Amino acid sequence: MVTKTIVLNQASTYHNSGSKNARGLISLSGENNILGELRLYNVSYEKDLKMLISIGGKNFLFHDVKDDFPFKIVNAPSSDDIFVVVAQKNDEKWREVVSGGKEIIDKARLFDEPSQDELDELILSEVDESELKTLSNQEIINPFGDEIENKNFYSLVEGQIDELFSRFPRFSQMEAIIPDSEWVRVCFSDNEDEHYLLGKLFADGKVSHICYAIPAKSEGDLPPKSLEDFVQWIPLDPEKLGGRGYWVMYQDAKTGENVRV
C-alpha cells in the first residue's frame, strides 16, 4: 500500500442529534510506516471517540479522536486488507459510529464482549505508543515530525490528493472566485449536500496551499469553534453576502500547518 483513501459510513446503530448521516474520510500514505489523517462529519464529540485500524489482521488503536486527526502507524504489515472503525462509548459499551474498508475484524467481539481493560491491553500491546503523533489542539497540525525534514508536506500526500482530483468533478465556481486555484467537489453519497471541497492554491506554478472547504447556508452557519481561527468565509456570490458559501481552511503545502486567517 502506498496511498489509500477510505470512506467511512455511518453504522446502523448510531444516531446523532442532527438529521444528517455521520460520515468519515481517512487517508493513508506509506507502507511499513504509515502517515494518516481522519476527518469526521456530522459526528457528536460529546463523548470520547476511539479509532481502530486493522491492517492485515494487526490492530492499532487511537484514543481521544477528534476531527482533522493526524496519526502515524509504525511497523504496519504490508497488506491491502484494511478496515477502520470509529467507536464511541455509550451505556458503558463501545458502539460503532462509522466504519469502512475490507471488514476483517469481528466488531461485536471488539466492542461488546471484552471489558474495556481487556480491549485496551489486547490492542495497545501491538502499538508503539512512543511513535504515535496525536493532535492535542488546532495549533498543532503537522503530525509527521522528522518525516518532512527533507521533504515538504505536499509531497507526502500528493498521491492521495491526485486520486481525489481524478475521481471527483472539478468545482469551477470556486476557481472563478480564487485565482490560481483548482478545486474538486468530494461527495459522500447521492445527496449532493453531503460533500466538501478539496482545493490547491498555486504560486509560481507550484502548490503553495492545500484547501478544505465546508459548505454552509450562510455566514451565520458557523463552523466548529475549534476551527474559528483557521477558516475564512467565501460566499459563492460576492454580491449576495447573505447567501450560500464555504468555510475554507488553508494548509501550508510545505509544513502541513494550518494557516491562521
Image (spheres, helix red, strand yellow):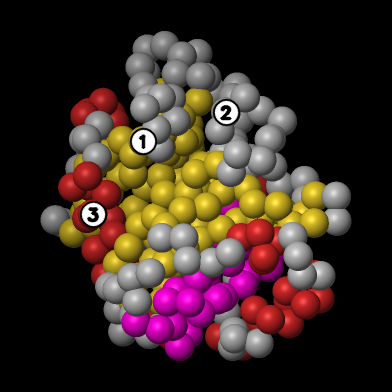
Residue closer to the observer: 184 or 152: 184
Q: Which residues are magenta?
A: 50-78
Tag 2 secondary structure = loop
Tag 3 secondary structure = helix
Q: Is residue 165 rendered magenta in the image?
A: no
How far apart are labels 1 and 3 at the CA level?
14 Å
User: Circle 3 sits on which residue?
Assistant: 163
Residue 178 placed where, x, y %?
28, 35
How far apart are labels 1 and 2 at the CA level?
14 Å
User: Circle 1 sits on which residue?
Assistant: 187
Tag 2 or tag 3, which sits nearer the N-term? 2
Whether residue 230 can be seen here: no
Amino acid type, residue under disc 1 in the picture: Cys
114 relative to 122, above or below: above
Give the residue at x 52% y 52%: 99
Give the residue at x 81% y 76%: 117
Q: Is residue 61 rendered magenta in the image?
A: yes
Residue 245 placed where, x, y %?
43, 24
Single out the residue that lies furthest toward the right.
92
Whether residue 114 can be seen here: yes
User: Circle 2 sits on which residue?
Assistant: 20
Residue closer to the observer: 177 or 197: 197
Residue 129 placed where, x, y %?
63, 84
Q: Quadrant of residue 125?
A: bottom right
Amino acid type, residue under disc 2 in the picture: Lys
Count of picture labels: 3
Amino acid type, residue under disc 3 in the picture: Glu
127 relative to 169, above or below: below
Give the residue at x 50% y 13%: 242
Tag 1 secondary structure = strand
Mark 2, Cα crowd under 10 Å, few <14 / some 14-19 / many 20+, is few
**Placement of the N terminus among the 4 image quadrants:** bottom left
